[in-house]
Amino acid sequence: MSLPHSQTIYSAEEYLAIEREAVERHEYLDGEIYAMAGESPEHGAICVNLTGQLYAQLRGSPCQLFSKDMKVRSGPAPQRSHTTKGLFPYPDLIVVCGELKFHDEHRDVLLNPTLIIEVLSPTTEAFDRGEKWLRYQRWLPELSDYVLVSQSMPLIEHFNRQSGGAWLYSFVNELEGSLNLRSIDCSLHLAEVYDRVSFPVEEIEEQADEDISTN
């Protein structure tokens, strides 16, 4: 998410009408439309690697994978044409298990993701960890897993919804490690997630220093 497309306030339905005719992708937050920033080569490679891993493991299962071009509604259902409250993001990857539920007949806005994965970028990390995550928790009752993937170091963070509604946090930060996603019966192997991705030397050294200090 970058700067607003304009200073005009749009309703959610106006945004959807505009977005369905647009060439470039835009996200929506409480009346404002934001042009999506371009991605780095590392971001693109990680998304492809994640897609490859999950696609292979989900074949033949009741779960379906979507990548980048599917929106999610994270907010109340618009009750009037001028409603501006809500968030319509394009997650990097989405998995839905079972029947697909959509915002309307256009079938381009999902309501019931099981898993959302975001590959973090310097310009979007604060939003992915903050306001977006808060809204996912509030408005996506069928979401069981939220995964954040760093592109600057080998690190995958996992938020898993527990039976009582609380979220359990865990992380994996070694290339030899893997993250198990029990809700979709899949595993993410970090060596494969970060295949062909080079990390800045200073980031690796800082991570090594942190590991030593915690031992």
Image (tube, rainbow, N blue to C red):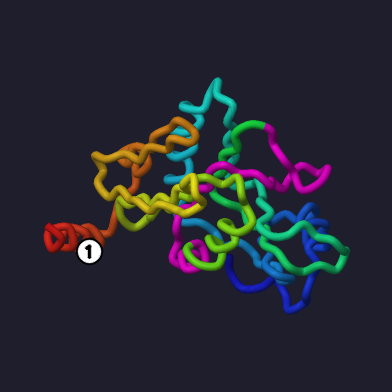
Image coordinates of residue 86 in percent, x first then y, are 70, 64
Judge whether residue 62 can be spotted in this image: yes
Seen as rendered, the residue at the extreme bottom is: 7
Mark 1 residue crowding within 10 angstroms, few (<14) / some (14–19) / many (20+) = few
**Which portion, as a residue range, is magenta?**
99-128
Image coordinates of residue 97 in percent, x first then y, are 59, 34
Q: Which residue is painted at 78% across and 75% down in the image?
A: 9
Specify whether residue 117 is painted magenta.
yes
Left or right placement of residue 34 versus residue 18 in this view: left
Specify whether residue 48 is painted magenta.
no
Task: Tell me the quarter of the picture where residue 100 sits.
Answer: top right
Seen as rendered, the residue at the extreme right is: 81
Task: Tell me the quarter of the picture where residue 50 sits.
Answer: top left
Q: Which residue is painted at 27% across and 59% down in the image?
A: 200
Q: Secondary structure at mark 1?
A: helix
Look at the picture and state if 198 lies above or below 6: above
The residue identified by callout 1 is 202
Choose between 165 and 120: the one closer to the eye: 165
Image coordinates of residue 181 in percent, x first then y, are 42, 38
Left or right placement of residue 41 versus residue 8 in this view: left
Image coordinates of residue 118 in percent, x first then y, are 49, 52
Q: Which residue is painted at 76% across and 42% down in the image?
A: 107
Seen as rendered, the residue at the extreme front is: 164
Look at the picture and state if 50 lies above or below 88: above
Task: Tell me the quarter of the picture where residue 178 sits.
Answer: top left
